[in-house]
Image: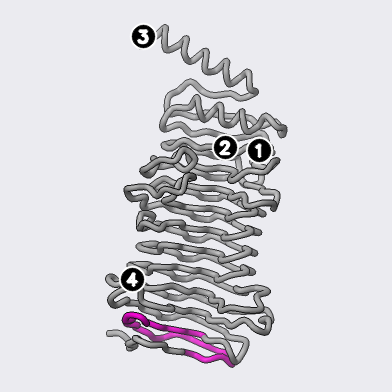
Amino acid sequence: MNTARRAFTACLSLSFCLALGACSSSAPGGATSVTCQGNSGDAARIQAVIGQSEPGATIQIGGGTCLLTRDVVLSGNRTYAGGSTTGTVLKQGAAMAFMLASSDYAGNSTTTGDPLQIRDLTLACDGTGRTDGIVILNWRVDVSQVNVHDCGGSGIVDTSVPADGKPITNTSVNSRFENNFVTGSGQYGFAVIDPVNAVTDGFFTDNQVADSGSDGVYLQNAEGWNISGNHLYGDGGDGIDAARLYGTTISSNYIEDFGVGQRTGTWSGIVGTAQDGPGSVLLGNKVFSLVAERNGASHRYIAVTKANSGTGHVSAYANVIETVAKADQAFYFNGTPHSLVVAFGANQVSGPGAARVLGGGVSISSGT
């Protein structure tokens, strides 16, 4: 394309965005901006700028409050940035399945999408329906300094299953979710939805997750994940539910008041199932229940409930637990229907509950 034609095309793109009340730069892969006006046209303004942006662009969202009366679909290979978590607020203004989702999720891709980054903004759901805050089907995602609150569904979802329910055919790895605050979700605070062993080797670190209707952190597949340094509190289900432990690290989390308000069932601060193969680490977690538990529910603070195949391996060291009722179990390990090998030591348990309970198929030692 010659210089005159490029200039003409850039002019048309800029005019299109200006007509919607948005403004975009002309530099390929450079900064692109959109200014919200706090009305029903904001979603269209944001979507128009995304559509006009080129791969590598940083899309700066400004204007204070953005009223979303429809969902916004995010293209890969771009950065989406607000001014700050208090300065840029995306506010739900209508019923929708999600507020933000990657184009590969919304467009029913058969493979994972390109990397993208989301940072420095707030998603304010209205607490109704099953609306998810952010849904990602991409590899090497970076979501940081984002607040998500009061979504009727889950706050943040990393998935291998697009909107049509047909899982992708490749892997979706190495994503990072860091320094986010997710509160008041109707379902999960953070969720990995992965029935096909695709969403692996990610990081969920130094986040706060509070007052979820179900689990604070739910991983349908925990293979290779690092779940560390998080503060989870007031969640109605388990603090961390990590299925298919395989080379997984769960460390230095502070978990309090899990299973809040439950009158039946068994609820855990950290619970998982183990795969055959490389072992997983449960290290240096602090798990407490600081409010009175309801009669009828049972509580385990750290538990591995079964080995899914072969022999699972887990190391549980230097965790601190305080139980509040005689029926509580500080640690629970079970291998049935297979075998579970546990290296166990230097943990501190206080309170009236049982310090350690073993089910079938468990071999336990102090390690080497």
Instruction: Work out how far the residue at label 1 is from the one at label 2, CA to CA, in angstroms.
Output: 8 Å
Label 4 Cα neighbours within 10 Å, binned few <14 / some 14-19 / many ≥20: many
Instruction: Work out how far the residue at label 1 is from the one at label 3, CA to CA, in angstroms.
Output: 39 Å
For residue 308, which quarter of the picture? Answer: bottom left
Query: Could you say which is closer to the camera, residue 364 or residue 166?
Result: 166
Question: Which residue is identified by label 4?
Answer: 275
Q: Tell me the SS state at disc 4.
A: loop
Question: Which residue is identified by label 2?
Answer: 72
Region in magenta: 330-356
Q: Residue at coordinates 41% horizontally, 73% vertically from top-left?
A: 273
Tell me, yes or no, whether the highlighted magenta stretch contains residue 341.
yes
Question: Which residue is identified by label 1?
Answer: 68
Is there CB contact under 8 Å for labels 1 and 2?
yes
Q: Choose mark 2 or mark 3, whichever is in front.
A: 2
At label 4, the amino acid type is Gln
Measured as percent of width and height from the top left, residue 78 is found at 45, 36
